[in-house]
Structures are given as structure tokens and as C-alpha cells.
Image: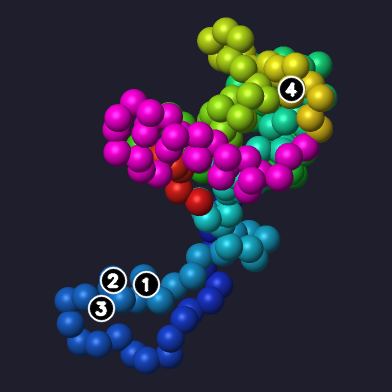
């Protein structure tokens, strides 16, 4: 694959005479890929909320049970996600951003009672999930967060909003 080309130069002012000039010049450059498009970034990856229904659809298509890899592949196909976008890393580990957000979506679907982790790395529809083709993802997230607050309150802990993935 050929290296990306810099096609646009933003800002027309000459570089100031200082040691930061090369850094400022680099900041003004916008790098485009060979097709003239901006490269994919984390902000382009669907949010965990946007992945809830595609995961549910993938499980239905795959007969009600699937590995994590099969689910991610199903979501990629369903949403038409590019290889570049699907491969964006999450932090410094081995996770991709899509994989990380998919894990959060599976967690919310599990806590809502639509899927279960039948064995390590395998997810399956519950009876409720087999009857449910799609959900209002925003309402599902709110219901799970409310359930979490109530559970924490019953245990005598201070209710607080659960930490969620970045959008």
C-alpha cells in the first residue's frame, strides 16, 4: 500500500521564526489517504449503543449462538464497516475499538436479559432474546443503568451511574 499523501495545507501564514516552526507546520497539514478521504478515527467507530441491535441481529442470523469473533464479523458485515475502521486499536492493548464497544453492547444486552454468556467466548440468545428482533437501544441502556443504581442502593452502597464506555 502506498504511503498517504498530504493534499491540503491549512493556514496561509508563513511559519514563525522559532523552534516550534516544524511542529506548527506539521499541525497545519491534513493527511488524506490515496482515495482523497480522511483516515478513519475512533470517532468514526459506532458507539456501543449503536452496536446493540446489530449484535442482536447477528445472533438471530447465526442461529441464536455465536463466538465473539462471529458476532464482530456479523456486525462488520451488517453495518458495512471498513477493515480500516474495524482495526482501529483501543488504547495500548490488543483490543480494537470496535471490539471494545461490542463488549459493552453485549454486556448491556446481557444485563437486559436478551443474551447470555453460555460459555467462555460464546454468546447466545435467551428465551426473551429469541422473541426480540430489535430494541430501542437508548431505552435499554437507561433501563440497565437504572437497574444498576437500584442494585447498588439495595446493597447499601451510594447509588451512582455505572462507568460506561466512551461514545
Residue denoted by label 2: 23
Task: Give the farthest residue toward the left.
Answer: 19
Q: Residue at x 60, y 44 (%)?
A: 49
Q: Residue 32: horizontal and vertical position, in percent? A: 56, 64
Q: Residue 99: horizontal and vertical position, in percent? A: 54, 33
Residue denoted by label 3: 21
Q: Which mark is residue 121?
A: none
Residue denoted by label 4: 128
Q: Which residue is drawn at 28% across and 71% down?
A: 23
Q: Distance between the residues labelled 3 and 1?
A: 10 Å
Q: Which of 147 and 49 is in front in this view?
A: 147
Q: Which of 120 and 80 is in front in this view?
A: 120
Q: Distance between the residues labelled 3 and 2?
A: 6 Å
**Residue 118 falls within the magenta-colored stretch:** no
Q: How far apart are marks 1 and 4 (CA)?
A: 52 Å
Q: What element carries label 3?
A: helix
Please state which of the two labelled residues, at mark 2 or mark 4, is closer to the viewer.
Answer: 4
Q: Horizontally, is 10 left or right of 141 in the view?
A: left
Give yes or no for contact between labels 1 and 2 (Cβ–Cβ under 8 Å).
yes
Magenta-colored span: 134-161
Amino acid at each position: 500500500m502506498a504511503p498517504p499523501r498530504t493534499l491540503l495545507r491549512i493556514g496561509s501564514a508563513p511559519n514563525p521564526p522559532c523552534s516550534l516552526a516544524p511542529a506548527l507546520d506539521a499541525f497545519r497539514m491534513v493527511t488524506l489517504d490515496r482515495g482523497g478521504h480522511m483516515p478513519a478515527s475512533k470517532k468514526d467507530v459506532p458507539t456501543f449503543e449503536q452496536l446493540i441491535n446489530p449484535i442482536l441481529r447477528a445472533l438471530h442470523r447465526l442461529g441464536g449462538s455465536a463466538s465473539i469473533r462471529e458476532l464482530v464479523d456479523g456486525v462488520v458485515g451488517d453495518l458495512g464497516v471498513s477493515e480500516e475502521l474495524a482495526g482501529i486499536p483501543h488504547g495500548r492493548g490488543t483490543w480494537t475499538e470496535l471490539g471494545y464497544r461490542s463488549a459493552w453492547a453485549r454486556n448491556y444486552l446481557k444485563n437486559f436479559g436478551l443474551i447470555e454468556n453460555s460459555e467462555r467466548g460464546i454468546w447466545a440468545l435467551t428465551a426473551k432474546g429469541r422473541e426480540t428482533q430489535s430494541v430501542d437501544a437508548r431505552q435499554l441502556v437507561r433501563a440497565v443503568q437504572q437497574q444498576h443504581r437500584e442494585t447498588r442502593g439495595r446493597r447499601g452502597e451510594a447509588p451512582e451511574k455505572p462507568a460506561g464506555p466512551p461514545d
